[in-house]
DNA sequence: AGGTGCATGTAACAGGTTACATGATTAA
DNA sequence: TTAATCATGTAACCTGTTACATGCACCT
């Protein structure tokens, strides 16, 4: 049985995760690798980061796959390569956005790990509860920093595309929630400490 | 000037992130690579996963570094290598737990990415709001699954080490928060849809 | 004259996943 | 006897970071 197209879902999708981000950014009107990196750093980096070391090679791979086209548009003597989505690129982006398969989710949180193991700390580190308070503070400090950054860009995004705004909103609300949770947890731990 | 010990902080710490997890797990009394993997999968995997492909080679590296010692303890004809923390291993674990430097935090969340780009979806995917609802549902489904798993182990951990319980509590509370947030967001989006 | 921002890129390395391969023990 | 669990490990691959290298354009 020689099947040519085993199923309509199996259209070749060699699209990597980073490739999808790049297609999306091009869809939002970004033109150069540099530009894409800028927007990533100002928007998605809290839930999806990307480095130049990924972006430039990936742009070439996408071009080889026919999903983007490139054009050299130097400004003066300064090199500049402008990328645009091809029809196939648009189609791949659409297919990804419409696909219902389990979205990838990966987290590594060293602060949580330290809390998890905090009972093992030697006595020279103070009481375990004091240590936990310290780690919670460090985790909260990071969220507070993130919150500031997100709030700073809120006015710019407020009247932009609703999807973009939704993720900003989620980031802000989540950070605020964590800050409150960690403060409450710290109060409980501090109460433990006083009882001793 | 021949300095032997430039500073007291620069004790060689070739301890990788995965290495720290392993030291911690050994600290909690786990003995074999298999054992460690089991506990990781039942506890930290939501904020820090690890595969056999990391664990076994890392155990050897830790032994080479003198942080753990190994002993062959076959049960019958079945091979079994038991690892234990050395004094140096205990010290390294303590140092890590007490260290105040910025804890690593890395997240990649494809669901968020899809929300972020959801305005770019072609018309064949339905309205952007309908698409967003779908993605939010997929994200919530995952959190609901995680919540179930965490709740199932809550009774076992409840009277265990407080640090371990704290991370479980945080996981549960965060998942519950996200579920409520996403439901509220969906209601807002659904209201948008009806207005059309 | 000098700093910042625009712009591109690579090489070495570190980190991690997946698939594969093997086999003993135990409970049903 | 057969399936699940215990137990170990490797090789190929993929992904991603860091550090390095280069140079123009623009503003002060």
Image (tube, coloured by chain):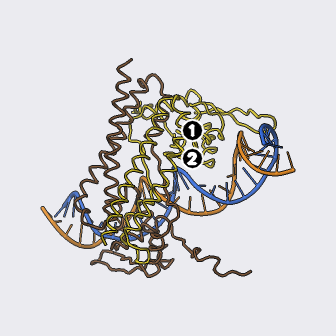
Chain colours: A brown, B yellow, C blue, D orange
Q: Which mark is residue B77?
A: none
* Vertical comparison of B42 with C17: above or below: above
Residue occupying the far front of the picture: B194
The chain containing the residue under callout 1 comes to B
Q: From the viewer's perspective, is B185 left or right of B47?
A: left
| Kind of element beneath mark 2 | loop
- Give the residue number, with chain letter if any, for mark 2: B50
The foreground one among A11 and B106 is A11
Give percent across and percent down for residue A126: 41, 23
Instruction: Check the picture and name the quadrant holding the N terminus of chain A.
Output: bottom right
At horizontal 48% and vertical 73% (from top left) the residue drawn is A95
Q: Are marks 2 and 1 on the same chain?
A: yes
Q: From the viewer's perspective, is A26 left or right of B75?
A: left
Q: From the viewer's perspective, is A147 left or right of A22?
A: left
Instruction: Check the picture and name the quadrant holding the C terminus of chain A.
Output: top left
Give percent across and percent down for residue A118: 47, 31
Q: CA distance from mark 2 to mark 1?
A: 10 Å
Q: From the viewer's perspective, is D14 left or right of B172?
A: right
| Kind of element beneath mark 1 | helix
Q: Residues within 10 Å of mark 1 (few under 14, many from 20)?
A: many
Q: Which mark is residue B22?
A: 1
The first of marks 2 and 1 along the sequence is 1
The foreground one among A82 and D26 is A82
The foreground one among A99 and A113 is A99
Q: Is residue A167 visible?
A: yes
* Vertical comparison of A56 with B69: above or below: below
At horizontal 66% and vertical 82% (from top left) the residue drawn is A4
Q: How many marks?
A: 2
Q: Check whether the beta carbons of the residues at disc 2 and disc 1 lie within 8 A of each other.
A: yes
Give percent across and percent down for residue A20: 45, 68
């Amino acid at each position: 049985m020689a099947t040519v197209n085993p199923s309509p879902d199996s259209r070749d999708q060699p699209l990597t995760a980073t490739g999808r981000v790049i297609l999306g950014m091009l869809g939002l009107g970004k033109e150069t690798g540099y530009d894409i990196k800028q927007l990533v750093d100002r928007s998605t980096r809290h839930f999806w980061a990307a480095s130049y070391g990924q972006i430039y090679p990936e742009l070439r791979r996408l071009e080889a796959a026919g999903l983007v086209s490139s054009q050299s548009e130097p400004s003066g003597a300064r090199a500049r390569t402008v990328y645009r989505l091809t029809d196939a690129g648009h189609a791949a982006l659409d297919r990804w956005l419409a696909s219902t398969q389990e979205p990838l989710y990966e987290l590594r949180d060293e602060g949580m790990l330290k809390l998890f193991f905090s009972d093992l700390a030697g006595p020279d580190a103070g009481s375990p509860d004091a240590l936990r308070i310290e780690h919670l503070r460090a985790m909260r400090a990071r969220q507070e920093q993130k919150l500031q950054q997100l709030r700073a860009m809120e006015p710019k995004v407020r009247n932009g595309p609703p999807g973009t705004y939704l993720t900003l909103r989620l980031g802000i609300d989540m950070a605020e929630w964590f800050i409150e949770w960690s403060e409450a947890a710290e109060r409980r731990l501090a109460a433990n400490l006083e009882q001793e």
